[in-house]
Image (spheres, helix red, strand yellow):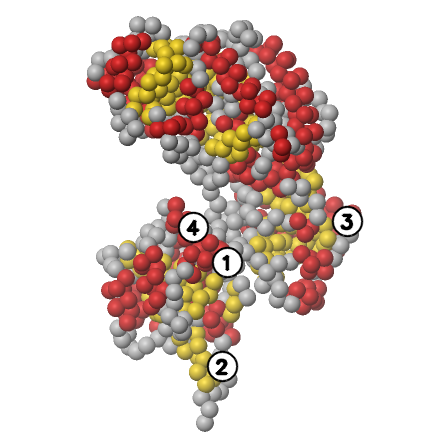
């Protein structure tokens, strides 16, 4: 087992757990422990360094998330009334996805902020931004209180059920990212009776534009919508759980038609400006997926604008494909109102990126859905922005426990 | 059927193929609702005419892995061929009785060009267990089985433990080495188990006709390309009549055969290739590499008559080689599209 953070010689699971069990220097971590907050602040500075942010823009988002002000906000939100005290859960074992390079840092940072000892398994396939984060973490360690190195560990190991089983048995909370298969596989390893899982299974997300809102928007706002949609969709090859898998236009059909054509042109401009290149293999993948949706009777027409954009006219909105179709593949449908969306939403649905709706309209939608699906409604361009409220969880609350004192 | 299937010039071929393939396209639309939906979604109307082969709508070959595409009713399915690459679901190819009869006949007609009309004694560079035990019903097994029909007095060059059976090969050559004989195998096995053995034991293969396929990846790793393959076989074993071929289960019965002077594949006249630009998907000019589309009139029981492969290739010339028509090479495979995404913590680890 490779020790990635703190960087060090290879280790095994027994000595790792023994080290984590020692009494930390300067006392145990508390919720919002200053020693952790300081460390996160130094890390944020390193991630926001211009060279780093240029190379990996997603690390800049992470850097912003970890700034002192943001962290203070997160901590304020979980302040407790008198007589209720919040404490760390203990040892938290994180199993993040291989392919979204940075999500493990958010999940780990919130858990560290809650005062937990953490073991994070970084995939052997991780690359690029993940490697850069690990370097930044190790660099930040130089200025950190020794308790950080003592309580926070990131390791890489090849598929090894024994290690995963040992960490599962030892932890108080297990955090499983990476979809249905990952959750199901990791769940075969028993936890201690008091421990539990926080799971992040497969999700699907959509985008919706209000026709009326679009018509009222200025040309600049419309361009921003296209830029936001581009970022939401193309950043992780449209494969992140929060990337929109389909775009709905909500309102009258004629207005939707006009809006769609204009939007298509604006998106093409963004793609040209970003000099996006879709590889031939991905272009073929998109054809396979799009033709497949048509073959199944769920699309009446398919249109390709180069290799970058494919749109599919859905036969019926409720037939919307939830699986990944390839980067830049957008099933489209026009809905007469948001309430049409309510009937088709499933538990699996996570994020709705919305433009042109009023707060009232969106809150009404949330009430109509009543928690049966769609955990977050965000503006265009924010679909991928991580938050401490994720997949319906208040993560800091999940990562901590409450003790009550009555006198 | 003794006429050559390598007779027609490109212009003659295209004219004939366009009529047949337009009819086939209509046939598949009428008999496969999935295929009809795909074409309709692309804005292609029923009865549409096409001005050239390049205008015919193509399906990505991987569609046969993701969908059940056939143009025959369930009760007429006579045979289902499956192939898998190293990853993912297998392709499923549905044949009725007619289709099952046509494909070996047309394969035979193609190979007759280099083998002549008689069945030749045949040396298989494989193990008999690949067909006998059906230990894994693989593309390799299917290839060996399909090709066995074109020879007689079969001898296998590997024993049942996949070890070279030198005595068997020597016995075969003693008996048949003075007359024309057929050798068949997969490219890398032919190199590893026939070339190496023949060189070491100084076997004379000069009366042999080698038919081989299966790709160059493993040989490129040891710096053996087609030219080197031919040169070393000629120099060390006397074998000069070597014909590589390119084909796929999704167009079963159609093979693109290397001409006698080597390094170019040719299309039998019921087939053709088009090289497409991977950005515009327009046809590439001669000499420009791109993605290979294969066209064949054979697939009638499933809509596989115009397929975009995931192979890269280049057309070297037209009507200027050993046989008329286009001559081309396969250059390699498109890399697989891999998504980043949230959904694969451990499923990825399984593969790694």
Q: Which chain is mark 3 on?
A: A
Residue at 74%, 45% in the rendered image: A257
Q: Which residue does the numbered mark 3 point to in the structure image?
A: A253
Q: Which label belongs to residue B347?
A: 4
Circle 2: is it few (<14), some (14-19), or many (20+) Cα within 10 Å?
few
Q: Disc 4 or disc 2, which is closer to the eye? A: 4
Q: Secondary structure at mark 2?
A: loop
Q: Which label belongs to residue A201?
A: 1
Q: Which chain is mark 2 on?
A: A
Q: Name the quadrant containing residue A32.
A: bottom left
Which is nearer the N-term, disc 1 or disc 3? 1
Query: How many labels, in total?
Result: 4
Q: Which label belongs to residue A80?
A: 2
Which is nearer the N-term, disc 2 or disc 1? 2
Q: Secondary structure at mark 1?
A: loop
Where's residue B19, x and y in %?
66, 17
* Left or right: B278 as drawn, with respect to A255: left
Decide: is A306 above or below B324.
Answer: below
Cα separation between marks 2 and 1: 30 Å
Residue A359 in view in this figure: no
Q: Nearer the viewer, residue A254 or B253?
A: B253
Q: Secondary structure at mark 3?
A: helix
Circles 1 and 4: CB distance less than 8 Å? no
Where's residue A241, x and y in %?
53, 54
Cα separation between marks 4 and 3: 42 Å
């Amino acid at each position: 087992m490779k020790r990635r953070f703190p960087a060090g010689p290879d280790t095994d699971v027994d000595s790792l757990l023994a080290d984590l069990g020692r009494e930390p220097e300067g006392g145990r971590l508390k919720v919002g422990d200053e020693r952790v907050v300081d460390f996160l602040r130094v890390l944020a500075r390193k991630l926001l360094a211009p060279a780093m942010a240029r190379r990996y823009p997603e690390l800049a988002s992470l850097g912003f998330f970890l700034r002192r002000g943001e962290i203070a906000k997160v901590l304020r939100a979980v302040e407790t009334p008198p007589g209720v005290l919040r404490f760390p859960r203990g040892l938290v074992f994180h199993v993040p996805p291989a392919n979204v390079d940075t999500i493990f840092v958010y999940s780990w940072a919130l858990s560290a902020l809650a005062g937990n000892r953490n073991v994070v398994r970084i995939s052997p396939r991780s690359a690029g931004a993940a490697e850069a984060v690990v370097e930044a973490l190790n660099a930040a360690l130089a200025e950190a209180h020794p308790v950080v190195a003592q309580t926070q560990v990131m390791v890489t190991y090849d598929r090894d059920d024994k290690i995963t089983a040992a960490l599962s048995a030892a932890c108080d909370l297990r955090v499983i990212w990476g979809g249905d298969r990952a959750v199901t596989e990791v769940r075969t390893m028993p936890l201690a009776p008091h421990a539990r899982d926080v799971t992040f299974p497969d999700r699907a997300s959509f985008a919706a534009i209000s026709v009326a809102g679009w018509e009222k928007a200025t040309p600049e706002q419309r361009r921003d919508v296209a830029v936001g949609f581009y970022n939401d969709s193309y950043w992780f090859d449209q494969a992140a759980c929060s990337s929109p898998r389909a775009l709905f236009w909500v309102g009258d059909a004629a207005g939707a038609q006009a809006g769609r054509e204009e939007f298509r042109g604006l998106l093409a401009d963004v793609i040209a400006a970003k000099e996006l290149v879709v590889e031939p293999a991905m272009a073929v993948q998109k054809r396979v997926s799009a033709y497949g949706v048509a073959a199944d009777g769920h699309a009446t027409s398919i249109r390709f604008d180069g290799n970058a954009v494919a749109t599919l006219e859905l036969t019926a909105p409720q037939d919307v494909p939830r699986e990944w179709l390839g980067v830049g593949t957008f099933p489209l449908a026009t809905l007469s109102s948001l309430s049409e969306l309510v009937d088709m939403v499933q538990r699996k649905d996570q994020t709705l990126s919305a433009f042109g709706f009023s707060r009232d309209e969106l809150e009404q939608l949330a009430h109509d859905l009543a928690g049966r699906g769609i955990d977050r409604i965000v503006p265009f361009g924010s679909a991928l922005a991580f938050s401490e409220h994720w997949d319906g969880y208040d993560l800091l609350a999940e990562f901590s426990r409450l003790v009550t004192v009555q006198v | 059927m003794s006429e050559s299937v390598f007779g027609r010039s490109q212009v003659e071929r295209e004219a004939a193929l366009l009529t047949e393939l337009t009819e086939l396209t209509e046939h598949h639309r009428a008999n496969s609702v999935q295929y009809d939906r795909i074409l309709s979604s692309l804005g292609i109307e029923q009865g549409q005419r096409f001005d050239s082969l390049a205008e015919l709508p193509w399906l990505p070959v991987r569609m046969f892995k993701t969908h059940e595409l056939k143009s025959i009713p369930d009760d007429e399915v006579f045979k289902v061929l499956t192939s898998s690459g190293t990853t993912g679901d297998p392709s499923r190819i549905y044949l009725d009785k007619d289709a099952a009869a046509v494909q070996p006949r047309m394969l035979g007609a193609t190979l007759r060009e280099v083998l002549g009309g008689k069945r030749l004694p045949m040396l298989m560079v494989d193990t008999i267990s690949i067909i006998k035990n059906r230990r894994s019903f693989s593309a390799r097994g299917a290839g060996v089985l399909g090709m066995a029909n074109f020879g007689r007095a079969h001898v296998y060059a590997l024993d049942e433990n996949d070890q070279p059976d030198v005595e068997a090969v020597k016995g075969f050559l003693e008996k048949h080495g003075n007359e024309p004989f057929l050798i068949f195998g997969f490219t890398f096995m032919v190199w590893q188990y026939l070339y190496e053995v023949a060189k070491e034991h100084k076997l004379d293969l000069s009366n042999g006709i080698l038919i081989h396929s299966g790709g160059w990846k493993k040989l490129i790793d040891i710096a053996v390309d087609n030219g080197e393959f031919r040169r070393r076989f000629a120099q060390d074993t006397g074998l000069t009549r070597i014909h590589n071929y390119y084909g796929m289960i999704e167009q079963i019965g159609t093979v693109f055969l290397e001409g006698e002077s080597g390094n170019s594949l040719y299309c039998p006249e019921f087939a053709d290739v088009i090289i497409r630009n991977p950005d515009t998907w327009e046809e590439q000019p001669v000499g420009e590499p791109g993605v290979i589309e294969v066209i064949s009139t054979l697939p009638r029981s499933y809509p596989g008559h115009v397929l975009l492969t995931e192979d890269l290739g280049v057309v070297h010339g037209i009507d200027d080689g050993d046989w008329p028509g286009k001559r081309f090479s396969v250059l390699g495979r498109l890399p697989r599209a891999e998504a980043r995404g949230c959904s694969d913590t451990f499923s990825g680890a399984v593969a790694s």
